[in-house]
Image (tube, rainbow, N blue to C red):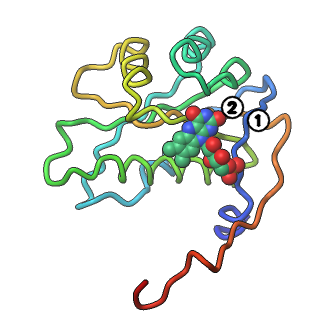
Amino acid sequence: MDTLEAIYTRRSVRDFTQDVVSKMDVQDLLKAGMQAPSAKNERPWHFIVINDPDVLHAVPSFHPHAKMLFDATLAILVCSDRRLELKRASWIQDCSAATENILLAAHAKGLGAVWLGVFPDADRVQGMQTLLALPPEIRPMALVAVGHPASRPEAIDRYDESRVHYNGW
Ligand SMILES: Cc1cc2nc3c(=O)[nH]c(=O)nc-3n(C[C@H](O)[C@H](O)[C@H](O)COP(=O)(O)O)c2cc1C
């Protein structure tokens, strides 16, 4: 799948089979995340790979939109390390770019994934910090549920000419 096809056809997948995501696939997703652009090339991210069903199943107790984790065999938490955010406060953008790269890589590899928002919801941030015993300087930004899709939503063309402006508003 080429890059534009991946971008145009990616959708959130929330319906997974019980097939395990291979270590090689996990490695590719992490590589894609770390390949993202970041302000001043700070790369403040850390990635926590979660494949323990007990941990996955605990997330919906504090995250109301994460019930698909009862089916998913894998999730990747994208975090920022305050100690690496030295030059700019761009960690949300940096981690968001990494998260989107993971979503696109998953789709390109025939996997399915969905972005589960964590930051800035205080309950979700606290829930992830407690569940994964995160040090205080590690800020959870987004959780990506990943798996082999049991079903996949159809691609949608969302191009909207009315949102495009040239050389000013
Ligand atoms: C910041 C952010 C937070 C999101 N949080 C959730 C979530 O908690 N649960 C969920 O099922 N989907 C979540 N999504 C996925 C969106 O619902 C989804 O991207 C949107 O509806 C568009 O659908 P698509 O991804 O299939 O194109 C989130 C997406 C973003 C960018």
User: Can residue 5 be seen from the camera position used here?
Assistant: yes
Whether tag 2 and tag 1 are in contact, CB under 8 A, the answer is yes
Q: Position of residue 20 (x, y in %)?
A: 72, 26
Write down the quadrant of residue 8 in the picture.
bottom right
Residue found farthest to the top: 54
Q: Residue furthest left?
A: 86
Q: Earlier in the sequence, mark 2 or mark 1?
A: 2
Image quarter where the N terminus lies is bottom right
Q: Which residue is drawn at the image coordinates 84% and 34% (left, top)?
A: 150
Residue 24 visible in the picture: no
Residue 96 lies, in percent from the top left, at 44, 49
Image x and y of residue 105, in percent: 61, 52
Q: Quadrant of residue 60?
A: top right
> In the rendered image of this protein, does residue 37 appear above or below residue 46?
below
* Residue assigned mark 1: 148
Q: Nearer the viewer, residue 168 or 72?
A: 168
